[in-house]
Each structure stands twice: as C-alpha cells, then as structure tokens.
Amino acid sequence: MGQTLAEKLLSLHAGHPVVAGEYTLARVDWVLMQDGTGPLAVRQFNALGRGSLALAERTIVFLDHAAPSPGRALSNDHVFLREFCRKHGAVLSDVGDGVCHQIMAERYVSPGDLLVGADSHTCTGGAFCAFATGMGSTDIAVAMTLGKTWFRVPESIRVNLQGSLPRSVTAKDAILFLIGQLGADGATYQALEFGGEAIERLGMEERLTISNMVVEAGAKCGLFPSDEVTRRYLEDRGRGNTFQPIAPDKDADYVREILLDLSSLNPQIACPHTVDNVSQITQGNVLGTPIQQVVIGTCTNGRLSDFMQAAKILKGRKRHPGTRLLIVPSSRRVLKDMVANGILETFIDAGATVVTPGCGPCVGVHAGVLGDGERCLSTQNRNFRGRMGNPKGEIYLASPLTAAATAVEGRIADPRAYL
Ligand code: SF4
C-alpha cells in the first residue's frame, strides 16, 4: 500500500515506514513558540532539567501576539523570553518582525520538514509539504529538550480541488466553505491532504491561507504536495536549495475523499461565534449587517497578495465614517513590499490605521479590542466569543475582498459589486 503525505513525512522523521494509526517517535526540524505560550514552554523546559536545547538554532521564539507590549506583565514575559534566547542560543524574532507562521514561511520551513509549535496555527507550514502542527507547551518542552517527540500517525482525508476560483472568490472563501462542510470537528486528528488538478493554479500565499485554517476543522495538519509553485516561492526568498518534490503515492489509503469545485464557489462568511457557522454571503440576513471594525491581515490573510486584493476595492475610496479599518501586515517584509508597490498609501488614503506587523487585534490583547455590542469583520481565522478581547463583541470571518467592500459600506457587503 502506498503512502499519504502525512505517512511519508512522518516516515522520513521516524527513520522507518509508518502507517496511519501507528504511534511513533519522530525527529523534529523546527520548534516554535510565541509570547503567549512561550513562557510556560520555557518553564516546562527548565523543569525537565536537561539545561540545553537539542536544536538551539532551530528553536525560534516569536514576540508577535502582544507586540509592542500593551502592559507590564506582557513586557516582563518578553524580557523573560529574550533572556531565554540569549542564554540558550535560541533564535529571537522580536517585536515588529511579524507573525510566527509568516516568518516561518519566509525564512525557515521547507518541503519534508517536521515543525512543531506552541501555537495551534503552526499547521500553516503544511503549505510547503512540511508536517507542521501545534502542540501543548509540555510537548513543546520535550521537543526542545530531546529534538524529537511522539505522534500518532494521522489518517488522511483527501481534498481534490478542481476548477478555478472565480474573480471575486479567494482561497479564504474556499477554506471557509470546506470548514462549513466538515464542521469544527469534522477532521479531528486527521490530516487534510490537498490535491487535484487545481492546485497548480494556487499560489503559495493561497496555499498558506488554506493550510492555516485546517485546524478549525480539527485537523492535525493540512498538507499540499511540493511542486514548481513551492520551488519558485523558495527561490524568490533565496532558499531554492531547500526544495525537494514530494507527492503522495497513487495507491495511498484515505479515510475519505472530497471533491471541491473551486469554480462553483461564491464569497463565504463565518458568522459569530464559531468558524464552521459558514454561509454564502448572500444567504440569510448577513448582507447589510452594520460593522464597526474591519481587520485585514493576520497570519491567515496578511500577505502581499491579500492586501493587493483589498487595495483593488479601496483604491480611490474611503472607509465608511462609522467603521474603523485596521491593516495588519503579517511581517516586516510584507510591510516593506506594501510601501514599495504603493498599496500602503492606498490604505492610508482610505482612512486605515496601520498596525505593527504581528498578530494585531486577532487574539484580543491590544490594537483593536472591541467595545460592548460592537461587530468586527476580520480576515483572521477564529471568531469565538471573546476572541478579540470582549465577550460582548461579535466577529465575522471573510476574505480580504469582502473585508474591503465592507469597510467602504460600513455594512457587510458583497465584493462582487466592486470587481
Ligand atoms: Fe494566532 Fe491570530 Fe497571531 Fe495567527 S494572527 S498566530 S491566529 S493570534
């Protein structure tokens, strides 16, 4: 029997062939933590008493969730993590560098890697055909100490993508639609493996958006094969030498196969307060809902192509006076690219507030906490009650195109009217 991508990648790191359902120890290539989860992971690492990192130059600490820090306790966490990096030789990605998952994509993760992170959206790295997954702080401390950790090899759901995305429909709409179909626990501890004739037309930034959100269906990871698209992305970032082509075997065994015709999709929206509460934007009474804050960015949709889509609608227009518009670049590089191609000016002219590269208001600690009764439409990946710092707020999730149209109208709007 052939192997799925998950089986292939874990076999590479176990040192012998493994099959779904088996428990295995696997060698780790990268360990990441961020300023929310990092302090606990470091304390657990200290408690294990080994005293040194197994992979110092491959253990990366990101100060991105509360960056710059809005308060004393978080500032002290940053001091603690900077000191940990200095003492143990771990890599520090400091305030303003960007979100962990974007920096991993730009600088570190490559096809065939095994990446574990103390952050649930570590699955973003699956876009490179890396086995990338989030773990709790104790498991991360073990990986930091030993350079390996255990896995139950996940079963895989194959998602065959066909057709092409219509002009006003994005990868975000595709993954929202899929999560709506699967449900929040529809892929629990399984790998979502993407394939089919359409993937060669999906750029790396679109693949990153899709892999980023697979955990919202409970998936352990979201894997694309590595191909020419992957190679070009790595070459553009001076990392072409890390490319290797990896594809599943033709006779691999899947627990389920899903066909998703991209050309049949419409703009989608996830309504409060669960990510799988998805409908077409034109269904129900969603269109026209007043929105007080629009967020474009984060690790889900904070890349250059996302901002270029939003800028197509916002160029020459202003945000609605009753709606704040926050722009959150996912990295310093993305911010520089936005300056270089002029779209940052488009957003400033539209009345936007540009936030430090990082998580921005996504997790509700700063830079856009909602007021009581306020509604936000965001391109982020979660809309749980209280996610943006106030349980009396509501969060809708949608694409950068829908976000831009909504910012203009001050109400949830259909981007097709602008394109
Ligand atoms: Fe988590 Fe949001 Fe930061 Fe992404 S942008 S890592 S989802 S807090």
Image (cartoon, rainbow, N blue to C red):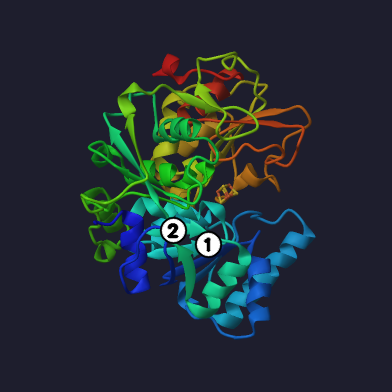
Q: Mark 1 points at which residue?
A: 117
Horizontal and vertical percent position of residue 278: 53, 27
Whether residue 303 is situated above or below residue 35 in the rendered picture? above
Dot label at residue 374: none
Q: Mark 2 points at which residue?
A: 132
Residue 172 found in image quarter: top left
At 50% from the left and 40% from the top, the residue drawn is 186
**Relative depth, front residue between 317 and 402:** 402
Give the side of residue 292 with respect to residue 55, left or right.
Answer: right
Contact? badges 1 and 2 (CB < 8 Å): yes
Quarter location, residue 341: top left
The quarter in which the C terminus is drawn is: top left
State the separation of the CA atoms marked 1 and 2.
8 Å
Q: Which amino acid does label 2 sit on?
A: Ala
For the point 28% across and 29% down, the residue is 164
> Element type at marker 2?
strand
Q: How crowded is mark 1: few (under 14 residues within 10 Å), some or many (20 or more)?
A: many
Question: Is residue 259 something one can see in this rendering?
Answer: yes
**Label 1 amino acid?**
Gly
The quarter of the picture where the N terminus appears is: bottom left
Q: Measuring from the top left, give residue 314's x and y in whole percent.
A: 48, 26
Q: Where is residue 237 in the image (x, y as percent from the top left)?
A: 32, 58
Q: Mark 1 or mark 2: which comes first in sequence?
A: 1
- Asked if residue 158 lies left or right of residue 211, the reply is left
